[in-house]
Image: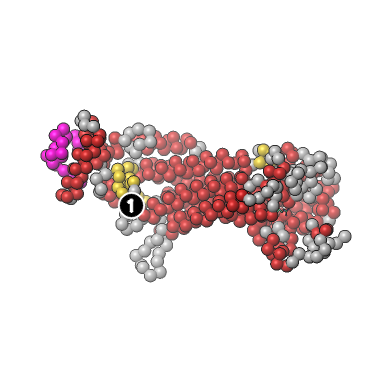
Amino acid sequence: MTSKTNHLWGGRFNEPTDEFVKIFSASISFDKALALYDIEGSIAHATMLNEVEVLTDFELKEILDGLNQIKSEIISGEFNWSTDLEDVHMNIESRLTEICGEPGKKLHTGRSRNDQVATDIRLYLRDNVVMINQELTKLLNALLDLAEQENNTIMPGYTHLQAAQPITFGHHLLAYFEMFKRDRERLQESFKRINTMPLGSAALAGTSYPINRERTAELLGFERISQNSLDAVSDRDFAIEFASNASLIMMHLSRFSEELIIWSSAQFDFISLPDSFCTGSSIMPQKKNPDVPELVRGKTGRVTGNLISLLTLMKGQPLAYNKDNQEDKEPLFDSVETIYSCLRIFADMVPKIQAKKENMLNSAIKGYTTATDLADYLVKQGLPFRDAHDIVGKAVAYGIKSNKDLSEFTLDELQEFNSKISSEVFDAISLKGSINSRDHLGGTSPKQILSAIKVGRNSIK
Ligand code: ARG
């Protein structure tokens, strides 16, 4: 029996699909990225069908041989992808039937492309999350190493991008460690929801064959099995959750990028980025542009966009599967590829960041960054904090007028502002004194940083 249109579903059709409709509906140009996962899913499905005696041993063998042959054809690049066959599932099934005839036609028993594609995406994402997690862990370790190396390096800490209080570069780097550590926790936590098997839900209602879903799940290494067939074929929460986690990672990378870009400018000159991660200008010979962080900052937009695309894709869909869902792949694949490459490039670049300690130190004292320490000193001499704040404000105003930092005032000058000030004040308002005094959990003292690094290393083991 031949049909006038697609031989996999064309039985009830009287005219062939419009040529442009074929192109418009085809997903093969992008969903072929799922090919090996599709084969893995089919192998497990067929094996289970044989165990429950829906497929004979002969049929199973033919199917497995055929699928393995197709796998080699795909890997070697010989496989002939056809837009006429719409998507990756039908391309592979059609080739299987070409190779082994009748048994190939039986592979789709008790299955639909709806549960098949949901399974493929989950297998794809599961693998990729493992790879992304590896790069994220590398980046976390690189941040810890650099923080350890720079635990004593003093720099200005900012609020409103105005110099606020001295901190150490190590402390600043550990702030990013915390962000990426939370990202890693989120990614790992989401894994069990990705690692849930929809196969067996068939088109939407399940199947009348005596399938053994536990067995298929075991063969595919799924931790859980979906509990409702309608939900299973239409659920893309796991993809949205990933896109959201990816957006948070990119937002953090983008903030870090922004700082690297500012710090490597001639005006700040706090760090130098490795030459191998920068580019020059075709007109200005002096330029060394921080392209890598700029591109990462730029790519953040598309990853956020992908999250919005997926949320919008799902919001109006009635149960169960709708063809809309074919649009889930490109944003998901794009977020996976973008996040992987951005994390990888940062993990490679961070160990090569060089701190310009002198410049950081010189900048740390500018802007009266130890004014709070002077106020705290006065509080320790018995003044209420508000009064101390006011006195130091006046001292800063005097410093601005006379072009001196607080630490450059003579004792006499300081005593003009309050008679309780004595010579130990100079220790309290020095950069080192300021940093060392913030010696509690979460504070910037070098001692605290070393212990935070220890805790950090244990937390990502
Ligand atoms: N290419 C389709 C997708 O990506 C596969 C599922 C098609 N199912 C269907 N009932 N037309 O979603």
Q: Secondary structure at mark 1?
A: loop
Which is more toward the observer, 350 or 163?
163
Which is more toward the observer, 74 or 420?
420
> What scheme was used to colour the molecule?
secondary structure
Q: Which residue extends farthest bottom?
A: 283
Q: Quadrant of the N terminus?
A: bottom right
- Magenta stretch: give its range: 405-426
Q: Viewed as shown, does residue 53 lie left or right of 309? A: right
Q: Residues within 10 Å of mark 1 (few under 14, many from 20)?
A: many
Q: Position of residue 106 (x, y in %)?
A: 82, 50
Residue name at image x 33 percent, y 43 percent: 168
Residue name at image x 31 percent, y 35 percent: 438
- Residue hosting label 1: 270
Q: Position of residue 292 (x, y in %)?
A: 45, 57
Q: Viewed as shown, does residue 257 lie left or right of 62? A: left
Which is more toward the observer, 107 or 158?
158
Q: Position of residue 296 (x, y in %)?
A: 47, 55
- Please tell me in which quarter of the rendered image ligand 1 is found: bottom right
Give the quadrant of residue 262.
bottom left
Residue name at image x 47 percent, y 49 percent: 251
Which is more toward the observer, 309 or 249?
309
Q: Is residue 358 magenta?
A: no
Residue name at image x 40 percent, y 44 percent: 173
Q: Which residue extends farthest left?
A: 412
Residue type pointed to by label 1 = Phe
Q: Can the viewer see residue 428 in this picture?
A: no
Q: Position of residue 176 (x, y in %)?
A: 43, 44
Q: Can the viewer see residue 236 in this picture?
A: yes
Q: Viewed as shown, does residue 19 lie left or right of 142? A: right
Q: Viewed as shown, does residue 187 lie left or right of 17? A: left
